[in-house]
Amino acid sequence: MPRVYVAGPLFNTHERWYLERIAESLESAGYATFLPHRDAGLIDLQSPASQAKVFRDDITALDSCDLCVALLTGPDQDSGTSAELGYMFAYGKPCFGISDDFRYLNNMLWGICGEGRRMAKDIPGLMALLADWRAAGVPGHSGARLGPQRAELARQDRDDHTPAQ
């Protein structure tokens, strides 16, 4: 079963609570998850050692996860979440977004999430998208950093879904 990096803003109890519900749903469906605040801890901004540890743990998890699910909320999506999505996309790893407010969705994030095809409004919608994605026979990921090969997979994914001219 693929391993999922669960990204999202971590600034308040509500955001962390909702991310935990996303992770629980994924885990109930058999996915392994990495949830940054649960698995790497919250950052102590007064401690460079804490910042370095969390950064390194997150990069290790991004490298080892097969796909990303990101909570995309508010009029300007979280910069850390955006960086995580960009990192995964650059390595050709599928990215899924969840938001019930599409008025403000950043166009780059829309593109990273399959040009909107991998965006859900709620957790049940996300689970349905993931089920469809898995049923399509999308190959897994070994956990190795395969930059050029992953970039080629991302290019193929884009080409497969480019509208005819």
Image: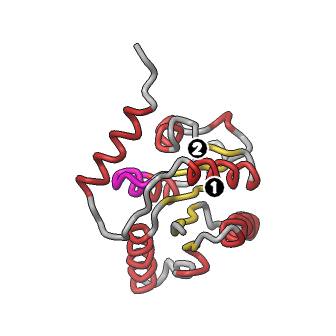
Residue 84 lies, in percent from the top left, at: 46, 59
| Vertical relation: 91 (above or below) 19 | above
- The residue that label 1 is drawn on is 71
Verify whether residue 84 appears in magenta. Answer: no
Q: Is residue 119 above or below residue 23?
A: above
The residue drawn where x is 68% and y is 52% is 126
Q: Which residues are magenta?
A: 86-93
Quadrant showing the C terminus:
top left
At label 2, which amino acid type do we have?
Arg
* SS under mark 2: loop
Residue drawn at x 40%, y 40% as measured from the top left? 157
SS class of the residue under badge 1? strand
Q: CA distance from mark 1 to mark 2?
A: 12 Å
Q: Quadrant of the N terminus?
A: bottom right
Quarter of the image for residue 162 reads top left
Relative height, residue 78 to residue 35 (above, below): above
Q: Residues within 10 Å of mark 2 (few under 14, many from 20)?
A: many
Query: Does residue 59 appear to the left or right of 69 in the view shown?
Result: left
What residue is pinned by disc 2? Answer: 118
Residue 16 visible somewhere in the drawing: no
1 or 2: mark nearer the eye: 2
Q: Earlier in the sequence, mark 1 or mark 2?
A: 1
Query: Based on the displayed image, in which of its 4 quarters is residue 52 positioned?
Result: bottom left
- In the current view of this chain or complex, which residue is farthest to the top? 165
Q: Residue at x 37, y 51 (%)?
A: 92
Residue type highlighted by circle 1: Leu
Left or right of 19: which side holds 160? left
Eyeballing the image, is 25 above or below 109?
below
**Image coords of residue 120 (percent x, y):** 68, 45
